[in-house]
Image (spheres, grey):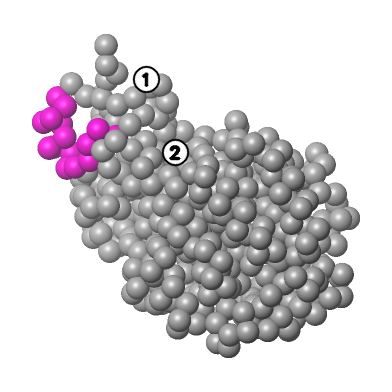
Amino acid sequence: MRDQIVLHRAPWVLPVVQAPLANGAVAVRSGRIEAVGGFSELQGMYSDAAVVDYPDSVLIPALINAHTHLELSNLAHITAIFRPESFTGWIENMLAERRRSGFSGESVLAAAAQALTSQQQDGVIAVGDISNTGLPRKLSAAFWGELLCFKEFYGLSAATVKGTLQALTREGDQLCTAHAPYSTHAEVLQALKQRSLRLGHVFPLHVAEPPSEAEMMNSGRGEIADFFHERGFWSDSFQPTGIDNTGSVQYLHQLGILDDRTLCVHCIHVSEKEFAILQTTGCSICLCPGSNRYLNVGKAPVVDFLRLGIPLALGTDSLSSNPVISLWREMFVLTEDHPGLAPADILRMATLGGSKALGLEHELGSLEKGKRAAMLAVVLCGGKNTVQDVMEELVSHANGRPPLKLIGGSGSCVTSREAN
Ligand SMILES: [Zn+2]
């Protein structure tokens, strides 16, 4: 016998892939969406269906956090006590704190677990996590959604190439990636990207984050190069492009790294030529406005990206560079950084854009037939009579999540959980 249909009804339903619905509903069977439409229309189609009401709420797809580092969650004190004067100054401080507190002890895992719990309470159904230790992989089973744990590799020397290639043989088919073009040997970048393609994985990496990154990529000089020389991390095997007015995007393109399975995280400082590369290669960009604000590295050219149709996702980055890791706050920071940005575009980044960035677009990110019924019923303040009112309220949460319920499918019953 097939499981019963449940109609989830709310004053507003925002499917993301189609126009918002007033007095809408989502028909769910066995955790999958059967149909999305007006409530009376769906009730006509499924007359025996049970109905679950969410009064004063809007139904939206569960959120996707496309970029974080859960293993740095025990370093949350950094943003309270340290004002970065430079990007490398922050890295130095963060690494010192990491050495002091240990990389993988119980307290590191406990802080990571707490941060993941807060993601779930925020209504995040998928997380793109980057770690050096692989520690967050231990947390997957406790999460209600998809925790994609990418193990990150870096290093510029020839010895690093050999060591990394050996290390990768021990990773089986686990998710792996590179830190950034300025910190990772070209051969390692290419090997990791080829491995990701072979395994059908997406490939996230940090791109064009601090202003000094382009100088490093063009000439092998500047703040980052100085930092590497001081720490003994520099290697002459690093070959700058020698091309002015370009940067990491151009460099990665030359290496064949960019395609529609690559996720460029940050992309703040991008030249005209690089806009065209991003557009034609089809890669996604993950914006991290909260982290960018704390690190004072600039604002990504979001309006240009949207104009060019470049797929955009949203990420919190870690608690070591962002005082609050909540996608609700990230959406709000975007409205502050880019007044005039349409709330519908922002919501798309936090849902469908994130699912594409993490390779989950066939399962998550929108309310449409066949996808998993991972939804949020977000409680609205009174008097929300227009779509614009609803949209504006969704992106107005400066301090984190609004009251919401998580709705997820499992087995024959659809569960609904309060998030406090
Ligand atoms: Zn990051």
| Mark 2 residue element | strand
Q: Quadrant of residue 241?
A: bottom right
- Name above or below for residue 82 compared with residue 405: below
| Mark 2 or mark 1, earlier in chain | 2
Q: Which residue is mark 1?
A: 412
Local crowd size for mark 2, using a 10 Å CA cut-off: few (<14), some (14–19), many (≥20): many
Q: How far across and down, in percent of the image, does residue 271 sit?
A: 50, 82
Q: Taking the image as drawn, is residue 377 in sight?
A: no
Amino acid carrying mark 2 in the image: Leu
Tell me the crowding category of disc 1: few under 14, some 14 to 19, or many 20 or more residues within 10 angstroms, Cα based. few
Q: Is residue 358 above or below residue 146?
A: below
What span is in magenta? 33-47
Q: Horizontal and vertical percent for residue 397? A: 47, 60
Which residue ends up furthest to the top in the rendered image?
1
- Taking depth in this image into account, of 171 and 357 the one nearest to the observer is 171
Q: Which mark is residue 280?
A: none
**Which element is circle 1 on?**
loop
Residue 192 in view of the camera: yes
Residue 186: quadrant of the picture? bottom right
Q: Position of residue 83 (x, y in %)?
A: 74, 74
Q: Give the left or right position of residue 106, taking residue 135 as reference.
A: right
Quadrant where the N terminus sits is top left
The reply to whether the residue tagged 1 has its Cβ within 8 angstroms of ligand 1 is no
Q: Which residue is mark 2?
A: 406
Quarter of the rendering containing residue 68? bottom right
Up the image or down, 227 lies above or below 20; here it is below
Q: Nearer the viewer, mark 2 or mark 1?
A: 1
